[in-house]
Amino acid sequence: RSRAARYLPLLAMAVFSVLVAVALLLAQDLLEGLGDWGYAGAFVAMLVNNATIILPAAGQLIVAGLSASLNPVLLGVVGGIGGTIGELTGYALGVTGRRIVSAENLDRRLRRVPRRLFGPALFVFAVTPLPFDVAGIAAGTLRYPIWPFLLWVGAGKILNTIAIAVAARFTIAWLERVFGLGG
């Protein structure tokens, strides 16, 4: 296979990520309008938020805003599922980038982590504000099986998004009481 053909999947993923980031910058009003879509807006916002590699988007802010009027647990589940699907871009980048980076060197380093700990590590990265893109790319590079990846990441993203929605709901209610805002 030619050298250019090996780099094509990585280039395609990089271009996709840049296009998503540019679209987010150009369509701020549209992104903010996702809040009007309710649960579907949370799903799309978190999917786009997590589909960008390295560059953050406003998914969590939309979920926080929606928590005032929607069930925060259901909002967290729907948004977490969207976020999980979005994280597949990092995983795919790891799978395609494996052909380009020194896979042997990277494999040697990553294989020091026992395989049984990789799923819980994905969960920790997904449930906390740690930079998940690194973990997703590593999972793809190691060819970690896709279904366990989705289960571990999904559990973490759902809990993370529920926590954001619940915290925002209580914070909004508290601010309304303290400052006499809202109804």
Image (cartoon, helix red, strand yellow):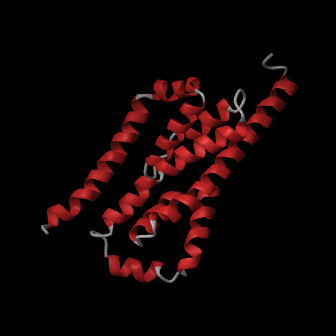
**Residue lying furthest right in this view?**
178
Q: Where is residue 116 in the image (x, y as percent from the top left)?
A: 57, 78
Q: Where is residue 22 in the image (x, y as percent from the top left)?
A: 37, 37
Q: Work out whether residue 58 can be spotted.
A: no
**Residue lying furthest left in this view?**
2
| Location of residue 152 by image quarter | bottom right
Question: Residue at the spot x=53%, y=28% of the render?
Answer: 34
Q: Work out whether residue 161 can be spotted.
A: yes
| Location of residue 11 by image quarter | bottom left
Q: Where is residue 111 in the image (x, y as percent from the top left)?
A: 47, 81
The reply, left or right, for residue 62 in relation to residue 18 is: right
Question: Residue at the spot x=65%, y=46% of the render?
Answer: 161
Against 77, is 38 above or below? Answer: above
The one of 148 and 115 positioned closer to us in this rendering = 148
The one of 67 and 182 positioned closer to us in this rendering = 67
The reply, left or right, for residue 24 in relation to residue 182 is: left
The reply, left or right, for residue 68 in relation to residue 116 is: right
The one of 95 and 19 positioned closer to us in this rendering = 95
Against 141, is 85 above or below? Answer: above
Total numbered badges shown on the rendered structure = 0
Quadrant of the rendering where the C terminus is positioned:
top right
| Location of residue 144 by image quarter | bottom left
Against 49, is 67 above or below? Answer: above
Against 12, is 115 above or below? Answer: below
**Residue lying furthest top in this view?**
183
Quadrant of the rendering where the N terminus is positioned:
bottom left
Q: Where is residue 82 in the image (x, y as percent from the top left)?
A: 53, 44
